[in-house]
Amino acid sequence: MLPAEYSVEDRTVIVTGAARGIGKGITRVLAEAGAKVMVTALTDRYLGPLAEELAAAGTPIETLAADATSAEDWERTMGLAMERWGRVDVLVNNLGDAISKPLIPLPGSGGGSPVSDEEWRSVLDVNLTQAFMGCRAVGPHLLERRRGRVINVSGFAARKGAPGLLTYSAAKAGLARFTQTLSLEWAPYGVTVNSIAPGFFPDPETGDPDEVAAARKRAEKMVPLGRVGELREVGLLALYLASDASRYMTGETLYLDGGVTHA
């Protein structure tokens, strides 16, 4: 039996971008552990199937189609959370996406379009602004209660850049500093702010089978542990950060990448 500090029973959690991939892995583990979870995504496409699956497993969740980069949608999200639960204990800012393009055309590279102004802003919004919006919406409630957990989902690009991932790497590095700085602002109020930086975590349920197979093949060569991550493994780390077992940790970015950032 686990020590009581690891329990998240009846803890209320909002997870953004949670209908598939890493967010889905986090949601499954927290719901299984007894947390009350609300998941948001831009559309209902994957929210319904996930809710049906977890309800059948005896771990029902709340779902809401909402844009995590929109202040107006965050008002709706918090409104529903307070209506259902009366409080929010944990916020998981999980939204993220990447593009692979150079800053400018590279001589001798054979072409390829560079990052446009719109793409630059979009990638920053999806990876960094979303955490700003989420923390701004939920933060006053956490600070008033003088307790709570914030978990920002970053990526190994926060520590280690790669050609073509300039925009994504800048956003994730910014998220690491956002996490660190906000943790200092909120520490006096009993609220911790940490970040998980996953490596290769393809979703075998919703990802393209060929792309998933290719990711597994690449991981055999690129990842020191020789494999991709399993979505549940991110959920288990989120479980620790959402529990009282992590109450003395704040401002950290934890790299869950099989050793990629050390290779």
Image: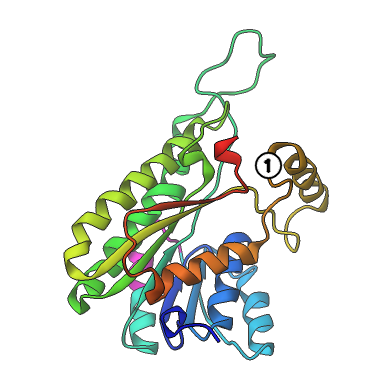
Let me know if residue 19 appears in the view.
Answer: no
Counting every numbered tag in the picture gives: 1
Residue bearing mark 1: 223
Magenta part mainly helix, strand or loop?
Answer: helix
Which residue of the protein is positioned furthest toward the top in this rendering? 108
Residue plotted at (30% across, 65% down) = 192
Q: Position of residue 121 (x, y in %)?
A: 42, 39
Color scheme of the displayed model: rainbow
Q: Position of residue 201 (x, y in %)?
A: 65, 53
State which quarter of the image contains the C terminus: top right
Residue plotted at (73% across, 43% down) = 219
Residue plotted at (47% across, 65% down) = 16
Let me know if residue 171 appears in the view.
Answer: yes
Q: Position of residue 217 (x, y in %)?
A: 80, 43
In depth, the one of 59 and 5 nearer the eye is 5
Q: Position of residue 249 (x, y in %)?
A: 34, 62
State which quarter of the image contains the N terminus: bottom right
Q: Residues within 10 Å of mark 1 (few under 14, many from 20)?
A: many
Magenta-highlighted residues: 67-77
Residue 243 in magenta? no
**Up-down: is 124 above or below 88?**
above
**Up-down: is 261 above or below 246?**
above
Decide if residue 94 is on the left or right side of residue 32: left
**Up-down: is 219 above or below 202?**
above
At label 1, the amino acid type is Val
Decide if residue 227 is on the left or right side of residue 130: right
Q: Quadrant of residue 170?
A: top left
In depth, the one of 84 and 117 nearer the eye is 84
